[in-house]
Amino acid sequence: FRIRRGAISYDSSDQTALFIRMLDVRLRSQTGYTLERQVSAEKSEKKVRHESTQRRQHCMLQKVGSWNFDIFLFERLSNGNSLVDLTFHLFSEYGLIKLFRLDLLKLRRFLVIVQEAYHSENPYHNALHAADVTQAMYCYLQEPQLSESLTSCDILLGLLAAATHDLDHPGVNQTFLINTNHYLASLYQNTSVLENHHWKSAVSLLRESGLLSHFPSEDRQCLETRLGSLILATDISRQNEYLSEFRTRLDRAELHMNNSQDRHFILQMALKCADICNPCRPWHLCKLWSHKVTEEFFNQGDIERRLNLDVSILCDRNSNSVAKIQIGFISFVVEPLFVEWARFSDTPLSHVMLGHMTSNKFNWTHLPQKDLRGTTQSTFS
Ligand SMILES: Nc1ncnc2c1ncn2[C@@H]1O[C@@H]2COP(=O)(O)O[C@H]2[C@H]1O
């Protein structure tokens, strides 16, 4: 009697094989399931799940101009490709692909190498921050003062600058690079070291992708120069220079959107706002960003302590708290800028942002510690 495991036999008189085959047939009829059917069921379930994720992502993109846009949820739905998917969508929305005769493949490839040039291990300065800034920039580009006057070149620049403004950020600030004699600090003579690096990295990826290779060289040169002027404006240590110029121009009513230099200055201020707008987002989003940026600060402080360097301001986890950092940042950096932005663009969005900023500052000041803790995901998942 041969021990038999399967129902396949080459001996038609083999009664055992016949018995197993009958058993298998009855089993199939009872459970209706075979291995093949199980695998194909899992495959189609996966396909349905993927299609519903794609549908949810597409549905979110219909509301990409909403200030409550949840970039953390979008990041999950886009499987970690929010910067590529969001920026590509906005290029299409504005008709930039046709207008500038952009090659679709080169555009996609450019956006992918930009997204990959961000450090995903950074808690804050990663591609998701760039996607968040790009979405905020889009909201500002849609404001009447801008949408009624910006040229397509202004819009192309605004989106490119937002997407690339923190390219290849190392997750530490300029002070750290100078104190550790990093080659970038000497390359840029300790001046806007990171912002210069972000700009030059953006230009090199633009050239590598060939995205603008069909542009006349003087147009390409002008775009690269203006891109630098926008990215260099995000150097937070120079905030007061830009802010006092903004105030002066507003006081003297010297901002005319039919003037290209004035439009460029407003794009600089729009990018600056987009770069630090996280305290003006709804509380659940603001809280997530605050914990991420603080984690990055404290990581730097831990390394400085280990290297026996002076621990940079805001980076010492032993003498700082997320709430304390946020209250200071909102009071001395965010509020002064967004008050002037609301003077320039007196719209519902500007007042919604100031409203969130005020209530978020109240939360950081008054909520009990248990309500201020960071959550890993946005609550609206
Ligand atoms: N929520 C926040 N709290 C404190 N600092 C912030 C916050 N968001 C942005 N920043 C700081 O603002 C800076 C803007 O320029 P960077 O992105 O180079 O680095 C950013 C941080 O140092």
Image (cartoon, rainbow, N blue to C red):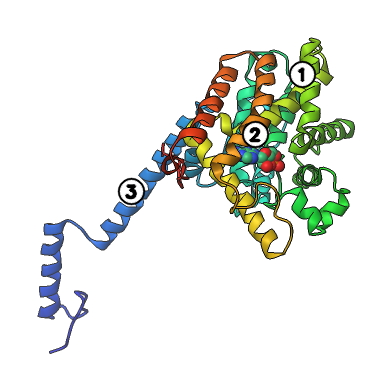
* Amino acid marked by disc 2: Ile
Q: Is mark 1 on a helix, strand or loop?
A: helix
On the image, the x and y values in percent for residue 365 come to: 51, 34
Ligand 1 has an atom within 8 Å of the beta carbon of the residue at disc 2 = yes
Q: Which mark is residue 247?
A: 1
On the image, the x and y values in percent for residue 319 come to: 60, 50
Q: Earlier in the sequence, mark 1 or mark 3?
A: 3
Q: Which of marks 2 and 3 is nearer the N terminus?
A: 3
How many residues crowd around disc 3 within 10 Å: few (fewer than 14), some, or many (20 or more)?
few
* Amino acid marked by disc 3: Glu
* Amino acid marked by disc 1: Arg
Give the Cα distance between marks 2 and 1. Answer: 18 Å
User: Which residue is disc 2 drawn over?
Assistant: 276
User: Which residue is disc 3 drawn over?
Assistant: 45
On the image, the x and y values in percent for residue 68 come to: 50, 28
Residue occupying the point 58% across, 37% down: 326
On the image, the x and y values in percent for residue 25 come to: 14, 64
As displayed, is residue 248 above or below residue 42?
Answer: above
Residue 28 lies in quadrant = bottom left
As displayed, is residue 134 above or below residue 9?
Answer: above
Residue occupying the point 75% across, 19% down: 151
Give the Cα distance between marks 1 and 3. Answer: 57 Å
Report the mark closest to the observer, 2 or 3. Answer: 2
Proximity of marks 1 and 3: CB atoms separated by less than 8 Å = no
Give the Cα distance between marks 2 and 3. Answer: 41 Å
Q: Is mark 2 on a helix, strand or loop?
A: loop
